Amino acid sequence: MNRLASTPAGEPVIDVDDLGRRFGDLDAVRGVTFQVGQGEVFGFLGPNGAGKTTTITMLCTLLRPTSGTASIAGLDTVSQERAVRRSIGLVFQQPTLDEALTAEQNLRFHAYAYGLEADVRERQIRRLLTMVELWKRRADDVRSFSGGMRRRLEIARGLLHEPRVLFLDEPSVGLDPQTRRRIWEYLDELRATDGLTIFLTTHYMDEAENCDRIAVIDHGQIVALDTPERLKGAMSGDLITIVSPSPTAAADQVRVRHGLDPTIVDDSVTFQVPNGEDFLPGFIRTFQLPLHSISVRRPTLDDVFLELTGHAIREEASSDGRPKKSSRWRGR
């Protein structure tokens, strides 16, 4: 797999070179390098604890890097942090709205903080609240809003000062699929009309599919960077998954009889073949263990992540905060 194949066309809006952040003995981010082009939707895909939020926090000038450099719109994130902050919008993973204020008051407070002139302020408040379908609720206290309404208001607030780049840290956490879809409709509209560049972190595979390019990050390092289709296409062939009473014995048989390299996750065994539909009939006839189920499909981003890192993105963190490893079976 071509792990760092793709670069944006033209001058990058975000330019990151060998960025690192260390907390005591922990390297939270290690040697991260990438560029993001104007109007691009760029995603960081990885599990909790992979370094996504630490990276975005450094890019937004809220945390100083231990090593490396980063610039936004040609502005250094350390030496020109104030100018960088005027060029970016940020929607945090955790809610930051003032629940005692109305939707309109939350936006006005933000507009005053950025020193927006009155005509710009009023135009943007109406435009953005209309876009996220909250204009009729502008005088209502935020405490009465649902989680989806609050997220939409936070996105409107992040866009109020007309930034060049919008950072979204896990924008869809806790939201239902319909709300997630509507949020992406708003963002696509802004991208088309304003040339907005969007940088998001996510562990949702369907959300990652909205990105022009994805950086797969694990244990603080980028392990792949390309378009979603190229990442999936780099995995050769189809994926066959079998469920058998003894996954280890099943994996051993796949390796010995067919010369393949299976992966065991929970009770299932997955392996790749060039043409799954042609391979399957002969495999079933010769397989010498009980089979509870068998399926064949094209690779997904879940499969890409598993192939690159050896563990599934949805696995829970272990006691030390790192994702638990799936058993990657290798014959001796």
Image (tube, helix red, strand yellow):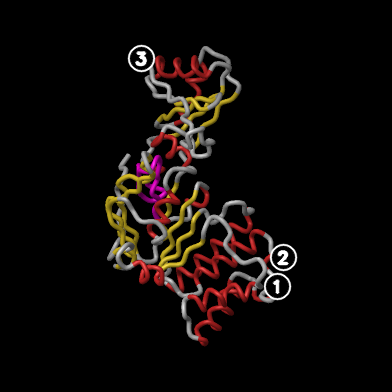
Which residue appears farthest toward the top when viewing the image? 288
- The residue where tag 1 is placed is 140
Camera-near label (3 vs 2) is 2
Classify mark 3: residues with Cα within 10 Å, few (<14), some (14-19) or many (20+).
few
- Give, as a three-letter code, the residue at label 3: Arg
Q: Quadrant of the N terminus?
A: top left
Magenta stretch bounds? 212-230
Q: Point out the tag, 1 or 3, that comes first from the N-terminus.
A: 1
Q: Nearer the viewer, residue 77 or 169?
A: 77
Q: Residue at x 50, y 25 (%)?
A: 269
Q: Residue at x 56, y 19 (%)?
A: 244
- The residue where tag 3 is placed is 332
Which residue appears farthest toward the bottom when viewing the image? 119
Whether residue 219 appears in magenta in the rendering, the answer is: yes
- Give, as a three-letter code, the residue at label 1: Asp
Give the spatial CA distance, label 1 vs label 3: 65 Å
Classify mark 1: residues with Cα within 10 Å, few (<14), some (14-19) or many (20+).
some
User: Is label 2 in contact with label 1 (beta carbons under 8 Å)?
Assistant: yes
The picture places residue 317, in percent across and down from the top left corner, at: 51, 36
